[in-house]
Image (cartoon, helix red, strand yellow):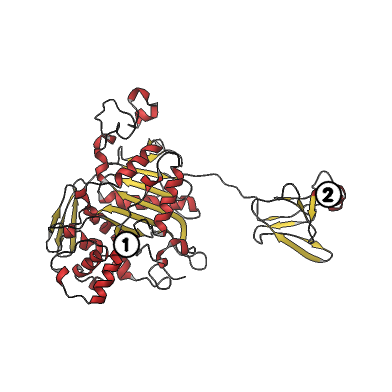
Amino acid sequence: MADRDGGPRGERDLVASVGFPSSAMADRTDQVNLLLLANGLPVVGDFANRPLSDVSRGFLEAHAEQQRLLADYRCPVDRRIEAFLAGHFAGVADPDTLRLPARTLVLSRHGIARELSLPAHGNEYSNDYLTSYRVKNGVLHNPRSDRRTTQGTFHVAEGGLPIPGDKRATPKALFARLFAAAMDPPRALLTLPFAANQPTPARGFVSLLLRPVVCPEVKGVTPEKSLEVRFFAPGALVSNLDFVESIFGNAGDPSLPRNDAGLDVEHWTGHTGCVILAPHLTQLKKKDLGLPAWNDATERQRRDGMAWKNESELYNNGAAFKLTCRTSEGVIVTLIADNYYGYCKKEVKTQISYAANLYGNVEEEHAGGAIAFASSSLGDEFVPVPGLATNKRTWADVLRDYSSMMSLMPEGYGIDKKFPALVYIPDHARASVNRLEVFWDEAGREVAIPLEPGKVYMRP
């Protein structure tokens, strides 16, 4: 199996994933402009007048047109996320309102996000949420609020896994409404800092693919296992993606087969995460989001702030929050109504813990707040014990009395004619989970049939 950077596992492209060594991180202005051109976005400075070969320019323009025509196409990981949302919110919300951004500027290599986070020909950028500076050793990003408390921050959508008492339980329909609002940010929030000083600035969502490790490799025991996480942010908040890729690495373009976790079953835990930055959600009113009036609310809704007394009340009193929807299916989607960098990092760590809990046999990223589910094992092999059956009947007795009820197979067992999932086997038959077979001796030779899920194997 090739790894997600195109080479054999263990030989990752460190420049593409984590930007190492730093000597490879030269001026990327031209590279970013090529990316903008390939996505049909306005380029910066005099790049439009730069001499490009006819073949190169034609290829980039054709790619931009293909992107426009394929607006409804989603890469494999995004299809998994949208399928989960459509299924989980069936009957609650229109599936068309639960679509991820149709077109995003995909940050397929480490360092592109950093170049996009500052003006192409400037050393400072600011908006309503942050201020960024170019410094000698890189960049300095200062969010508007550097939070130090989590009180009232963690909200969890109902309808999934149990919600701890210290988290705020939100109605299922509320998540769907907030998700739809997250996909419709203010126009100014979509402006890319790289092009902010241009007469026609480039605008849009930016996205990133991560593959954080859940289970490290143990040679001779297990290969490295990771989950897949998709990050989406309005263009003005691209610095948040610069921050998280510097911690967890860049997993490449999610549209390429080599980066599809679904084709990398040996190294994927089977879990998918999604994080969407949407700080504008703090300006939405409870009443407009469909939350009940105070007198119509339950006790927990009142306690968790999911009811209003005044029609002008803002959701969560206008304070930052993150809202998570997760079930045992293995998909977790989180809306972060803030641009605090710590929330982005902590959410990836939370999703690692979520995957660790469901996958099992690995340690959580941090130990607090684990959800434990009871499990049991009946063993790997069933061996008949002589005299255990109280009716003392043999296979010959079954054939004599009930052969008309079953279809007899040449191997020496029967299948119920009315209930095909019911299989009648000899009294001396054994079953092995490791072999995935039911087997017995017949006239000095072993006979074996598949041990299949959903079937009942009945001895006399």
Total marks shown come to 2
- The correct choice, above or below, for 64 with respect to 419 in the image is below
Q: Amino acid at mark 1?
A: Gln
Is there any visible trace of residue 109 in the rendered image?
Answer: no
Mark 1 or mark 2: which comes first in sequence?
A: 1
Identify the element where label 2 is drawn.
helix
Which residue occupies the foreground of this view, 419 or 162? 419
Q: Position of residue 264 (x, y in %)?
A: 46, 64
Q: Nearer the viewer, mark 1 or mark 2?
A: 1
Residue 313 place in picture, x, y as percent: 25, 30
Q: Please tell me which residue lies in front, 221 or 22.
A: 22
Res 404 label: 2
Q: Which residue is mark 1?
A: 67
Q: Residues within 10 Å of mark 2 (few under 14, many from 20)?
A: few
Q: Amino acid at mark 2?
A: Ser
State the image coordinates of residue 36 (x, y, percent, origin top left). 23, 64
Report which quarter residue 282 is drawn in: top left
For residue 369, the mark is none
**Is residue 32 at all visible to an observer of this figure?**
yes
Q: Which quadrant of the structure image shows residue 11?
A: bottom left
Q: Secondary structure at mark 1?
A: helix
Residues under labels 1 and 2: Cα distance? 63 Å
